[in-house]
Image (cartoon, grey):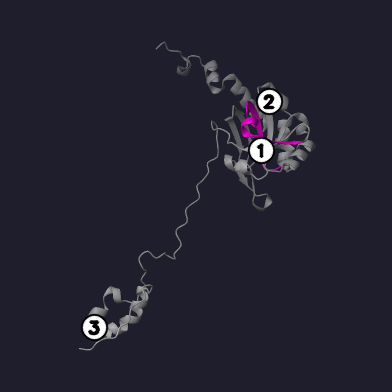
Amino acid sequence: PRTLATSPIPPHTTMAFITTTATPFVSRLAGPALSARPFLTSAPVRRAGALSTSAAPARAAPTRMAITEGDSIPEHELTIVKPSGSFETVTTADLFSGTVAVCAIPGALTPTCQEQHLPSFIENVAALKAAGADKVVCLSVNDQFVMKVFGDVTGASKAGVIMVADGDASFVKKTGLVKETGAFGGTRSARYGMLVVGGKIAKLNVDVGAFEKSDAKTLLADLEDLKKGGDYDKLCSEDPSADECKVYDD
């Protein structure tokens, strides 16, 4: 019998190399029956434990749900413009303590915000406070210097509106109440009016598209209704015999 000269196979040699180089020789030696076996084909073979070069399927980013009525205001720090014109960093726990009426706008000095939305709150600061609001604030994704100018040119600061700056949109991102404006200004706040009582959202009126229900008068009506007891009291005053209004001994 003929003796085949062989050499040790380096341990790092892949099966693909072995099968590619050995197959023609084995085919001549052992015939078609042996060369047809799966491990002697020229198909690429990956060693056990080798990393795959194919990209893993991308996972979808989790969708952040926007906060809504009954939710607590997220913990955060924001910059406010003080009546003196200086700036102060405050926590949301302090800013939203008590009863707070909020005017949230997409951008300071922009047409709808400056000509309609904020003016509705300026005109109703006294009425909102008479109805039970401890503070009236205007929130926007702008730096504190822009918010100071905005408060000055509109008369909001003089009227008693606290101007609040969320310069990097980090707070509005936590709330989920965002408006993506692309090249115009990136991530901004959605337009809404909100009542916060004891750090929790009691009423939230978000505008989608046109300026419709985020105005101060709508929020004032909500505040007055809240002060009276809301829909429950309204139901019982109109229909005292309603089952919800009855008191049972048992």
**First in residue order: circle 3 vs circle 1:** 3
Query: Callout 2 environment at 10 Å: few (<14), some (14 to 19), or many (20+)?
Result: many
Instruction: Provide the secondary structure element on which disc 2 rests.
Output: helix
> On screen, 228 above or below 210?
above
Amino acid type at circle 1 is Leu
Q: Which residue is mark 2?
A: 128
Residue at image point 65% right, 41% down: 210
Mark sitting on residue 30: 3
> Residue 70: x and y, percent?
54, 30
Residue at image point 58% right, 41% down: 174
Quarter the C terminus occupies: top left
**First in residue order: circle 1 vs circle 2:** 1
Residue at image point 46% right, 62% down: 55
Q: Report the magenta residues as a range.
A: 86-107
Amino acid type at circle 2 is Leu
> On screen, 53 above or below 122?
below
> Residue 225: x and y, percent?
60, 23
Confirm whether residue 48 shows in the render.
yes
- Alpha carbons under labels 1 and 2: distance apart: 23 Å
Q: Is label 1 in contact with label 2 (beta carbons under 8 Å)?
A: no
Compared across the picture, whether 46 is left or right of 87 comes to left
Instruction: Provide the secondary structure element on which disc 1 rests.
Output: strand
* Residue 77 lies in the magenta-colored region: no
Which residue extends farthest left? 1
Quarter the N terminus occupies: bottom left
Q: Is label 2 in contact with label 3 (beta carbons under 8 Å)?
A: no
Residue 106 occupies which quadrant of the picture? top right
Q: Which residue is mark 1?
A: 78
125 or 48, nearer to the observer: 48
- Alpha carbons under labels 3 and 1: distance apart: 80 Å
> Residue 218: x and y, percent?
64, 29
